[in-house]
Amino acid sequence: MKITFLGTSHGITEKDRFTSSTLLTVGNKNYLIDAGAPIMKLLQEEDVPFNTLSDVFITHSHADHYLGLVEFVNQMESFKQFEGVKVKIHGPELFPYEAMRTFLFGGGDLHSFKLGGNRHETNDSTQRISFENYFEGEIFDDGNIKVTAYKTKHFADSHSLLVEAEGKRILFTGDLRHDLIDFPKEAVKNGVDLLIMEGAHARLASEPILNVLRSVDTKRMLINHIYYGMNPDGDIEKAKLALEDCYPIDAAYDGLSVEI
Ligand SMILES: [Zn+2]
């Protein structure tokens, strides 16, 4: 499977980094974990045909993890050329999907009429984009990938997501609490092949955080969602050295692709 980082910044878009979004390619299907980046542009840059995009998983309801969907949903639903596209968005309990559709398509009859019928109403079966809430536990299995959600303490509806595919396991931490008290024990107990760790809330080079990271059973760690004000390059280097006996660590950047 291939993991492509579309956006690796923290809450702020920077000149060379977009906010959180990661593309997962397994077989001939594509999935997104978070969608903060301008995904209409970036999916085309990565030559991803829209009809191969299957499901989008949002870790929590902070806008830097989903704003790319505003443009995506609008264009997918509004233009004939996207006929045949079917994408399901999986969002946690506070995800403002209804509000987003009202913002895009309006809520009144007159607006629906102008837009040509009920295609813009939520979860109509003719829609190209549908939405489903998820809670804790196994949330998805299409025979290609399996996704399990673990609640974290970053926000009221925040989650880490474990993706299992092709015999490999990847943990996307999503956003965590600053002290990592909510780091999913699953990656400690049963191990993962790749840890995609957020770098915006915990000081990675501090001893208590290094201790949590030492306990993780992984073959590799990539740092994503990096706030360099919190974790400057020098601290990432320190964490790398401190954990070199455990596993290799690299900072992810927009456009980075890894195969596992
Ligand atoms: Zn957040």
Image (cartoon, rainbow, N blue to C red):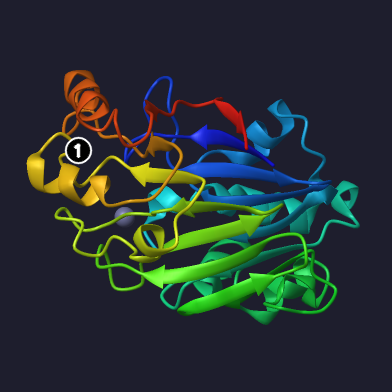
Image quadrant occupied by the C terminus: top right
Label 1 amino acid? Answer: Leu
Residue shown at the point (90%, 57%) measured from the top left: 84
Residue 200 point in image, percent of width and height = 25, 42
* Quarter of the image where one finds residue 239: top left
Residue 48 point in image, percent of width and height = 77, 37
Looking at the image, residue 238 sits to the left or right of residue 218; the answer is: left
Residue shown at the point (39%, 27%) measured from the top left: 250
Residue shown at the point (69%, 70%) measured from the top left: 141
Residue 162 point in image, percent of width and height = 51, 60
Per the image, the residue denoted by label 1 is 204
For this orientation, the residue located farthest to the left is 207
Work out whether 118 lies above or below 259: below
* Quarter of the image where one finds residue 177: bottom left
Looking at the image, residue 101 sits to the left or right of residue 201; the answer is: right
Work out whether 103 lies above or below 166: below
Establish whether ligand 1 lies closer than 8 Å to the Cβ of label 1: no
Image quadrant occupied by the N terminus: top right
The residue lying toward the viewer, choosing from 145 and 85, is 145
Residue shown at the point (84%, 56%) measured from the top left: 85
Viewer can see residue 88: yes
Quarter, ligand 1: bottom left
* Quarter of the image where one finds residue 46: top right
Viewer can see residue 134: no
The residue lying toward the viewer, choosing from 3 and 91, is 3
Looking at the image, residue 83 sits to the left or right of residue 236; the answer is: right
Element carrying mark 1 = loop
Work out whether 35 lies above or below 7: below
Looking at the image, residue 214 sits to the left or right of residue 87; the answer is: left
- The local crowd at label 1, few if under 14, some if 14 to 19, many if 20 or more residues have their Cα within 10 Å, is many
The residue lying toward the viewer, choosing from 44 and 215, is 215
